Image: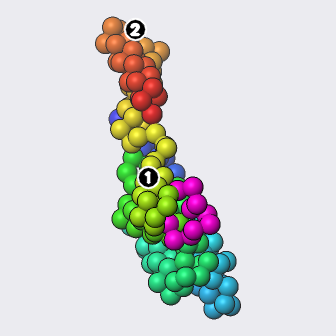
Amino acid sequence: MKRALIVLGVALAVVATISLRAVIAGRAELAAGDDWMLRGKPSLAVRSYEASARWYVPLAPHVDTAYARLRDLTITSPGTPIEPLAWRAIRSAARATRTLWQPHAADLADADAALARLGARDLEAGAGAGQTTAEREGWYRARYFEDPRPSIGAAALAALGIVLMLVGIGVVVRRRPSWVAGAVAIVGVACWLVGLYNA
């Protein structure tokens, strides 16, 4: 029991240290973005705001503020290169921070839709995407909303498989081998393989 508490304490300390580092770095990037805006360089501000959003920690205020700053830029810079740049930054930050859940899913959906609309209006870039604006927007939407990454369910199943496999092997190594521990390890390997296959 004492050993388990020590391991838990060390794990919590590591998580707290990583979270603190992310919050400090995220706030610094947010301040840098505000500074770039004061200097009249919105494209550099977009980079800093995106970096701030990527330093994701649940409930950290700098993340929501960074997304809000990027959204403000899409509103205040319509028809300029900053508008798609800010939408791409929102999309990139949201996709980069996905784990077993998707933070800022609404922001990601809005960015995908906005980029599809903007792409459909560009006749030169969207020449092969369709004849009408609606056809081109549909073509872009299909590509923006398609997620090539492994599904969350498959990733969770693979992670569960690794945990079960390690637990089973750990029990076998530290104690007398038992069929239960062996079965847990085998189930873990099976879950891991199925998760990888369906990823």
Residue drawn at x 57%, y 68% as measured from the top left: 123
Q: Position of residue 36 (x, y in %)?
A: 66, 84
Q: Amino acid at mark 1?
A: Ala
Is residue 2 among what the camera can see?
no
- The region drawn magenta spans 120-129
Q: Is residue 105 above or below residue 99?
A: below
- Describe the element under mark 2 as helix, strand or loop: loop
Colour treatment of the image: rainbow
Separation (CA) of disc 1 from disc 2: 52 Å
The residue sitting at the left extreme is 180
Q: Quadrant of residue 151?
A: top left
Q: Secondary structure at mark 1?
A: helix
Disc 2 residue type? Pro
- Residue 178 position (above or below residue 48): above
Assess disc 2: are there few (<14), some (14-19) or many (≥20) residues with their C-alpha within 10 Å of its C-alpha. some
Quadrant placement of the N terminus: top left
Q: Which mark is residue 57?
A: none
The residue beneath circle 1 is 142
Q: Which mark is residue 177?
A: 2
Circles 1 and 2: CB atoms closer than 8 Å: no
Return the residue nearer the eye: 96 or 177: 96
Q: Is residue 128 magenta?
A: yes
Residue nearest the viewer, comparing 64 with 28: 64
Q: Is residue 116 above or below residue 195?
A: below
- Residue 16, horizontal then vertical, whole percent: 48, 58
